[in-house]
Image: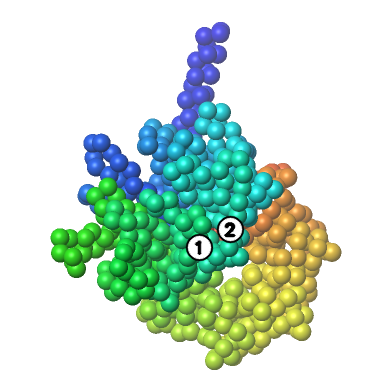
């Protein structure tokens, strides 16, 4: 009997393991590996050097010699696709700072540390490895955490200890082991026992410090929003565009083997040479841009490899700069990943009549069809590359809301038309778009209410007409041809020419409504700042679900409903949650399950039931 029970337990465990593997296989992540936030070089004894790139779409490991790459995402063990920083230890252990904690890759094994482990915040902006092997993690808004590798415990330092600000953007460690922290309120120096901070009062170019580096002479270089400042231990000296810097906003700094300093800006990269006989201006500054071979002018990270090559991580790929034997010759090489999303910040998703997926992003519109990607931008006829919402009507016409009007693409996908304030829109910043069952097009604006396109005429409705607020985040058509509007002051129902507004006083979880969906029974689902609320208009009953019911987070950005009325909601930082209508419990999926990022801005469901999740770190597909 005992033997039979043991066999049954083994079979059950194997079955559970198989289910876990199957569930992992059900997820696919699509992301752009070219929006680089940080670079790091790793030496490998057998295969040369690898270049690691932190991006907004995961981590990419490049083989410098062959140009081949491998991408790592949450499907591999990364905490989130949105990666801000990298640090590599001498033994090859990698550390990746993300918006969902810090992930360690050691001997092909992944582990993530979060606030539950003692990390100050899950939003890790910078990492530095001390000369003693200590790990320092700068966070957004919660100070800096020091990891004790022996105990895996954290010690956190904040403004209460002497840090200039809890928003720590960069860390540099000098030869004596002194830590320098660049923050949103200046630079802080910590020698292990005492703190000292420097600000504009002391000579720093700006208190908004974005990057730091320490050269071989021990001089501290700080990139800020007001230029670059150098500190020799006594005096501060600042260089700006007036001296030859490409831009006063400096994202990255590195020194090459000849002691020259390289500064990455959003207008290219500037090289600074300083030696006897050269003044602080003129010939000692050289700027490189796309005109010279740089893949993009927005340079976010710079590293120098063992051969002296300089690598630039930009918003559109990586450039390698190799100087040749001739003093005035150089060689530029570009490294980019294969076609994918134009931007990883995806705000909307829609599916057309043929099953093609349309993604609205910060960089334009990307479509995905039968494994092929295509991008539409302003160059093609789009009103703006900042796309807030996409709606595809019954005639397969695409209505695209942007911050510069509404663009319309016909079924043939060849003809564009844009509506702006010139055509009668009250303003060009459009937050939402939908078409109701009568064929009326509705455009929700940022501050001027909602506009209806009836035939060829535009009609504007504002708070003066009964709309809850002039900022309209969401629009949904009801099954009875009426329309619902989610605003910053409640939800408004438009029927027979009149508005009725519902707020927290009626049963809404919160008055800021980000998302609306209507199920087959006519129940209305409202995504708010304080959970998701279901409204049964026939019974007049309101039900709110929160994290207490299993929601990933109470901030709801998106809602989609399957044909069987299973509800999916995308949350702000808590992943995506599913409700099947039984009981009051929700099932939540996060990056730990295979989601690209836990900020889920839009959801669409394919005809075969496949779910598409638009996130701040790319797109996830769940079959």
**How many numbered marks appear?**
2
Whether residue 5 is situated above or below residue 160 in the rendered picture: above
Q: Whole-percent x and y of residue 197?
A: 60, 55
Question: In the image, 622: left or right of 461?
Answer: left
User: Does residue 498 appear anywhere in the picture?
Assistant: no
Residue at mark 2 to residue at mark 1: CA–CA distance? 10 Å
Mark 2 packing: few (<14 Cα in 10 Å), some, or many (20+)? some
Whether residue 173 is situated above or below residue 508 in the rendered picture: above
Q: Which residue lies under the disc numbered 1?
A: 236
Question: In the image, 469: left or right of 331?
Answer: right
Callout 2: SS: strand
Give the residue drawn at x 58%, y 43%. 145
Callout 1: SS: strand
Quarter of the view holding residue 32: bottom left
Q: Which residue lies under the disc numbered 2?
A: 198
Quarter of the view holding residue 299: bottom left
Q: Whole-percent x and y of residue 86?
A: 44, 47
Q: Whole-percent x and y of residue 519?
A: 65, 60
Given residues 103 and 373, the one toward you in this image is 103
Given residues 26 and 108, the one toward you in this image is 108
Quarter of the view holding residue 37: bottom left
Q: Residue 106 carries which label?
A: none
Give the residue drawn at x 73%, y 76%. 469
Given residues 472 and 379, the one toward you in this image is 379
Query: Label 1 near label 2: C-beta < 8 Å?
Result: yes
Query: In this view, which residue lies farthest toward the left?
Result: 325
Mark 2 / mark 1, whichever is N-terminal: 2
């Amino acid at each position: 009997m005992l033997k039979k029970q043991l066999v049954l337990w083994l079979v059950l465990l194997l079955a559970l393991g198989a289910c876990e593997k199957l569930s992992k296989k059900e997820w696919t992540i699509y992301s752009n590996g070219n929006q680089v936030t940080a670079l790091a070089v790793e030496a490998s004894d057998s295969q040369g050097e690898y270049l690691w790139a932190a991006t907004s779409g995961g981590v990419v490991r490049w083989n410098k010699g062959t140009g081949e790459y491998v991408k790592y995402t949450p499907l591999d063990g990364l905490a989130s696709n949105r990666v801000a920083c990298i640090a590599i230890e001498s033994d090859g252990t990698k550390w990746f700072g993300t918006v969902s904690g810090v992930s360690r890759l050691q001997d092909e094994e992944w582990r993530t540390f979060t606030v539950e482990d003692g990390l100050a915040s899950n939003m890790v902006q910078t990492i530095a490895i001390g000369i003693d092997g200590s790990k320092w993690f700068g966070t957004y808004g919660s100070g800096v955490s020091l990891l004790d590798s022996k105990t895996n415990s954290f010690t956190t330092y904040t403004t209460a200890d002497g840090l200039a600000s809890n928003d720590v953007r960069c860390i540099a460690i000098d030869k004596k082991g002194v830590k320098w922290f660049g923050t949103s309120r200046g630079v802080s120096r910590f020698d292990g026992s005492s703190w000292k901070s420097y600000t504009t009062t002391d000579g720093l170019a700006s208190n908004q410090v974005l990057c730091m580096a320490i050269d071989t002479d021990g001089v501290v270089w700080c990139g800020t929003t007001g230029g670059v400042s150098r500190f020799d231990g006594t005096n501060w000296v600042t260089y700006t565009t007036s001296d030859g810097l490409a831009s006063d906003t400096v994202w990255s700094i590195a020194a090459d083997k000849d002691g020259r300093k390289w500064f990455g800006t959003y207008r290219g990269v500037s090289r600074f040479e300083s030696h006897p006989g050269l003044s602080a201006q003129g010939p000692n500054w050289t700027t490189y841009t796309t005109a010279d071979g740089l893949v993009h002018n927005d340079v976010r990270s710079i590293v120098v490899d063992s051969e002296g090559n300089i690598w630039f991580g930009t918003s559109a790929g990586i450039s390698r700069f190799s100087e040749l034997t001739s003093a005035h010759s150089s060689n530029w090489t570009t490294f980019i990943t294969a076609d994918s999303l134009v931007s990883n910040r995806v705000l909307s998703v829609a599916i057309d009549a043929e099953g093609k997926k349309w993604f609205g992003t910060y960089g334009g519109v990307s479509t995905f069809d039968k494994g092929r990607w295509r991008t539409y931008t302003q160059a093609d006829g789009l009103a703006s590359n900042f796309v807030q919402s996409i709606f595809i009507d019954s005639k397969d016409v695409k209505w695209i809301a942007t911050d510069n009007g509404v663009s319309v693409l016909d079924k043939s996908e060849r003809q564009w038309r844009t509506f702006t304030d010139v055509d009668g829109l009250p303003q060009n910043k459009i937050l939402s778009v939908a078409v109701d069952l009568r064929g009326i097009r509705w455009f929700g604006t940022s501050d001027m209410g909602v506009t209806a396109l009836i035939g060829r005429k535009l009609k504007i409705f504002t708070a003066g007409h009964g709309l809850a607020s002039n900022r309209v985040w969401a629009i949904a058509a009801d099954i009875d041809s009426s329309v619902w509007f989610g605003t910053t002051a409640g939800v408004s129902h438009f029927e027979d020419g009149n508005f009725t507004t519902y707020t927290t006083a009626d049963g809404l979880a919160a008055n800021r409504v980000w998302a609306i969906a209507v199920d087959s029974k006519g129940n209305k689902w409202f995504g708010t700042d304080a959970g998701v609320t279901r409204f049964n208009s026939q019974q007049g009953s309101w039900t709110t679900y929160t994290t207490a019911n299993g929601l990933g987070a109470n901030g709801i950005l998106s809602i989609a409903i399957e044909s069987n009325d299973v509800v999916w909601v995308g949350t702000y930082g808590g992943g995506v949650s599913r409700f099947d209508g039984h009981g009051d419990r929700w099932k939540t999926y996060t990056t730990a399950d295979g989601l690209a990022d836990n900020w889920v801005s839009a959801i669409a469901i394919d005809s075969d039931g496949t779910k598409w999740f638009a996130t701040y770190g790319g797109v996830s597909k769940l079959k």
